[in-house]
Each structure stands twice: as C-alpha cells, then as structure tokens.
Image (cartoon, helix red, strand yellow):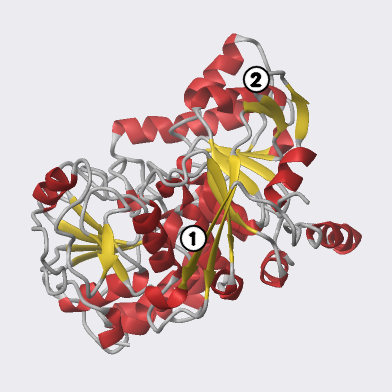
Amino acid sequence: MNTLFDKIWDKHVVQVVDDGPTQLYIDRLYCHEVTSPQAFEGMRARGLQCFRPEQIVCMPDHNTPTHDQDKPIEDPVSAKQVSTLAKNAKDFGLKHFGMFSKDNGIIHVVGPEKGLSLPGMTIVCGDSHTSTHGAMGAVAFGIGTSEVEMVMASQCILQQKPKSMRISINGTLGRGVTAKDVALYLMSKLTTSGATGYFVEYAGDVVKAMSMEGRLTLCNLSIEMGARGGFVAPDEVTFEYVKGKEYAPKGEAWDKALAYWKTLKSGDDAVFDKELTFDAKDIEPRVTYGTNPGMGIGITETIPTEGGVGFQKALEYMGFKAGEQLLGKKIDYVFLGACTNGRIEDFRAFASIVKGRQKSPDVVAWLVPGSWAVRQQIEAEGIDKVLADAGFEIRQPGCSACLAMNDDKVPAGKYAVSTSNRNFEGRQGPGARTILASPLVAAACAVTGVITDPRTLL
C-alpha cells in the first residue's frame, strides 16, 4: 500500500524520464520579491506568458518594513524588489497581494489562512520554508529561481522523487511545551542533515492533537533537518480550518473536495523508507545554544561538553561555554513572528505569559504578525490591549527580524530570543546572536530580561 506522499506525488506525475527526473505537475506557485525577478526576466527574454496564471500568487514579504508601510520604503534595494514584483505581476496578469493591502503578510502565513493551500496539492515557492504548507496535507517544497521560471512557463517542474520517512511522536505534551519545542527537539535528535533526501510525514498522538497553527510551525521547520519537505495527513482539524476560507471550495465543490481529501492518508500497511518514533514526555521547552537549529537543549539542560564539526566555533560566536546552563543568561532582543510563529495562536500564547506583567526595560521587543488578517484578529480579541498594558507594541506584517533583509536587524553581539526558524551566523544581522525558542519562552524572556523557563510563569 502506498504512503500518502506516494498518492499525492503519483497523482501529479506527467511523465517519468528513464534514469532521470520526474515531470511533476504543480497546483500552486507562490512568488515573493526576492527569488522571482530573474524568473520573470527569463520569461520576457523568451517571449513567454505564464501557462496557468490563475495558479500563481505574488506577494512581497522579505523586504517589507514592519512600520510606516503607507510611506515609501527607505531602503533602495528593498523598494526596488517590492516595486519590481508589483510590475511583474501586472505585466503577466498574476494575482498580487501588494504591501499594505488587507491580503498582505508573509506568503507562508497567508496561503493557508486564505484557503489557497489545500489538501492534496503540490505547492512550490522560491523559498525553503515552503514546507510550511505541508501542514494542510499538501506536498510543498522550496525551489530555485530557474525552477520558478520553469513552473511559470509550464506549470510543471523536473524533480527526483524523494524517499519517504514517517516521524511519530506519541503521548501527551507537558505543560508549556509547544509545536516549536517538538520541532527543535526533532532537529537536535536528527541533526540538520538527518532527513536529507526524505519527505517527512508527521504522525502520532501529539501531531493528531495539534492545532492547525501548531502543525504549520512543525512543517515549517522540516527543512532545518535537511528534509525536502514535511506534511501531516489531513483530518477533521484540517477540514474545519479550511472550511469557509476565501479561496476554499464552496457548496457542491466543497462536498466533492472533502470526499477526496478524506482518502488522503497512508494505508495501514504503507511502507516507509525510514520510520522514527519519539515520546512526548522527553520534550520540554527548548532553546538553541549554537549556530544551526539542531544545536539545541531542553531549557533546564546544560550545553553539551562536546559536539561535531563547528561546535567550538559556534560556542565562540555565541559567547557560551560547553557544560553551562542558559537559564538566567541576559538577553537584549525578543522577536515574535516569522512564518514559523507569526500566527494568532502564537500571539495568544505570548500574551498569556505577559498579561499582568511588564516588559523588561532591558529588552527591545519586536512583535510582528504574519499577516494583516492576524493583526486584525489580535485587535478583535483584545490581545493588543493586553500587550500594550505590558509595554509591548505590535508592528505591521512582514518577515521582519527573521532575516536581515529589512530594517529589523539585531545589532552585533546582542542576544535575540527569536521565534523564527534559523540561528545561522549573521542571520538576524551581522554579528547578531540568535537563540531560537517558542512564543512562550520568548514571552518569559521578554518580561524577565533573562532566559527563563516559561513553566515558572504559567
């Protein structure tokens, strides 16, 4: 019996080249401003139009400032990339969710929340964190700029079929443990290359019990284990989330789609190339100590005394020592947001800790919703008031301090507790030191000014 990955993949195969790649049909292409300009230029040079323009959605997110979005962008490179995407979308007749429109945000947050990403789809974007959309029960993965052009021109892509892996997490998560902690735990166990060449299906009690937001966070981080992508089989949680969304099927089309989506699961006798099982009771709130997402520990643990290649260099960059605890370490910045943790549930979690407390005067906090829709929900639920009373302000949507492509850069040598997905050297700004964590950990650090176990504040 086939795995769910096989079912979706095989349904999208156009042809297989002997001893070569598969020509795979793509249901949805997302384009942002950073990896699409050369693809559009290539299309122009060849005098081509997009083959199926209605299946392509364009949106700026990496370069958008998170304040004063109604004013011209100050940085000339960012301004050019954003305006070029708008022009390209117009020239090629593509759907464009421009900056400051109600539809704008981070593409990996907006796609699912609008019902543009649906179960059973193949989804690509010139961005590694496209695996986020796998939470919808889709096969979603990042591609290069030349492949973006390939999809524009043909709605197909040439790909080698990855191997399949199933990761099951069983049991019940403890208090204060989130999907982000699960992902950081898996990365520390598998390392950043442990899933290379695989597409991962997440399963087990913990994943079944996760909300859609939690699953989106988990799938978002698949790429950080080296996986081609990760996904969760669609179930009632998925269907409930998708129902009524702007671009989701309606009426009779919904009934038909739902009947098909209910068939999207791996058979009881499905054979995976690799199976791994973990226990929820082994996972506590987590933080990273190094310069890749796999270099992480439980928040009460100590930094290992030895590690692989680059271990010592990473500790030197971070200013940490082997064998020491991170609890109580002073921090300078807190970032809540990114395609990893910029959803409404993340803001609810953050607010649950800071409510009735005050932001530490030593901490600069950037709270950045993943979309205008999330920001609206924050206001509708009164979360903005809770945050304001605690001394926090909410910024405008965008990728923000996840990566140093906009104004929100962490200064050299400063420590940032970040809910984003990468802690590479200089990722949040030249010389910045990033500690990856969940929204609960970030909130605990924001009010205490030091690395704090959120369970002590819940």
Helix, strand or loop at mark 2 = loop
Q: Is residue 58 visible in this depiction of the protein? A: no
Please report the residue visible at 28 percent of the width from the left and 60 percent of the height from the top.
296
- Contact between marks 1 and 2 (CB within 8 A): the answer is no
Dividing the picture into quarters, in which one does residue 119 lie? bottom right
Please report the residue visible at 25 percent of the width from the left and 78 percent of the height from the top.
453
Q: Position of residue 357 (x, y in %)?
A: 24, 86
Image quadrant occupied by the C terminus: bottom left
Q: Residue furthest right?
A: 252
Above-or-below relation of 83 to 384: above
Amino acid type at mark 1: Leu
The residue wearing badge 1 is: 218
The residue wearing badge 2 is: 20
Above-or-below relation of 20 to 166: above
Above-or-below relation of 198 to 357: above
**Nearest to N terminus: mark 1 or mark 2:** 2
**What whole-number distance in Å separates the C-alpha atoms at marks 1 and 2?**
31 Å
Question: Mark 1 Cα within 10 Å, few/some/many (few <14, many 20+)?
Answer: many
Q: Nearer the viewer, residue 422 or 181?
A: 181
Dividing the picture into quarters, in which one does residue 188 lie? bottom left
Q: Is residue 453 left or right of residue 79?
A: left
Q: Nearer the viewer, residue 381 or 219?
A: 219
Please report the residue visible at 59 percent of the width from the left and 58 percent of the height from the top.
135
Q: Position of residue 259 (x, y in %)?
A: 86, 61
Q: Nearer the viewer, residue 113 or 208?
A: 208
Q: Is residue 357 visible in this depiction of the protein? A: yes
Q: Is residue 199 left or right of residue 244?
A: left
Q: Nearer the viewer, residue 365 or 456?
A: 456
Q: Residue furthest top?
A: 46
